[in-house]
Amino acid sequence: MDLAGLIDMNYFWWAFNKLLAPAMPFLVIFIAISAAGLLIGTLIWAFKKMRS
């Protein structure tokens, strides 16, 4: 069973670049902010748990 013809990877990468390349910086920034927020939230929660 040959799946190479079903999904043409060249077309996939073309569509990927056309759609996601403009949005990629925003995606990276969003992931970084959410990760930092999760870390800060965890630290605050740990300090609250430690103090009580």
Image (cartoon, rainbow, N blue to C red):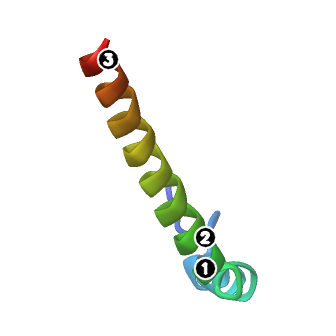
Position of 6 relative to 1 (above/below): below
x%, y% of residue 38?
45, 44
Q: Earlier in the sequence, mark 3 or mark 1?
A: 1
Question: Looking at numbered disc 3 in the image, what kind of residue is underneath it?
Answer: Lys
Instruction: Write down the residue under mark 1.
Output: 24
Image location of residue 42, percent across then percent down = 37, 35
The residue pinned by badge 2 equals: 27
- Which residue is located at x 45 percent, y 39 percent? 41
Q: Provide the secondary structure element on which disc 2 rests.
A: helix
**Is 32 located above or below residue 46 in the figure?**
below
Dot 3 corresponds to which residue? 49
For discs 3 and 1, the disc positioned in front in the rendered view: 3
Q: Residue furthest front?
A: 51
Q: Earlier in the sequence, mark 2 or mark 3?
A: 2
- 23 left or right, relative to 35: right
Disc 3: CA contacts within 10 A as few (<14), some (14-19) or many (>=20): few
Per the image, label 1 sits on a secondary structure element best described as helix
Secondary element type, mark 3: helix
> Which of the two residues, 38 or 26, is positioned nearer the viewer here?
38
